[in-house]
Amino acid sequence: MTQYWYNVRTHQVEEDAMSDWTQLIGPYETREEAEHALEKVKERNRAWDPSDTDGDGWSDKD
């Protein structure tokens, strides 16, 4: 079964993790899921910290 990974350095989807694992998010079952990996990360960041309105992992509170 093919797995798909999102490379945070190249911003490309890879099949079967071709790059170093420190650059990858995944695995995902479909290419489409991997293409939306950063959106999922931002959603999870907001769920974890609602004050992180832009989803960058940093609190936006003063």
Image (cartoon, rainbow, N blue to C red):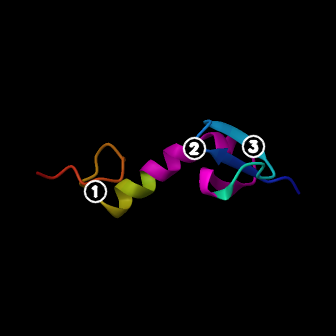
Where does residue 33 sit, x and y in percent of width and height?
A: 66, 46
Q: Residues within 10 Å of mark 3 (few under 14, many from 20)?
A: many
Q: Which residue is mark 3?
A: 14
Q: Residues within 10 Å of mark 2 (few under 14, many from 20)?
A: some
Residue 40 in the magenta stretch? The answer is: yes
- Tell me which label, 2 or 3, sits earlier in the chain: 2
Q: Amino acid at mark 3?
A: Glu
* 59 or 7: nearer the viewer: 7
- Tell me which label, 1 or 3, sits earlier in the chain: 3
Disc sitting over residue 50 in the figure: 1
Q: Which residue is mark 2?
A: 8
Q: Is residue 55 left or right of residue 1?
A: left
Which residues lie in the magenta part?
22-42
Kindly state the secondary structure of the residue where label 3 is placed: strand
Res. 44 image quadrant: bottom left
Q: Amino acid at mark 1?
A: Pro
> Which label lies toward us, 2 or 1?
2
Disc sitting over residue 41 in the figure: none
- The secondary structure making up most of the magenta span is helix
For residue 48, above or below residue 51: below
For residue 55, above or below residue 27: above
For residue 24, above or below residue 14: below
Q: Amino acid at mark 2?
A: Val
Kindly state the secondary structure of the residue where label 1 is placed: loop
Q: Residue at x 39, y 56 (%)?
A: 45
Q: Residue at x 65, y 45 (%)?
A: 6
Residue furthest right as drawn: 1
Q: Is residue 27 left or right of residue 51?
A: right
Gap between marks 1 and 3, in whole Å?
Answer: 31 Å
Where does residue 48 sit, x and y in percent of width and height?
A: 36, 63
Kindly state the secondary structure of the residue where label 2 is placed: loop
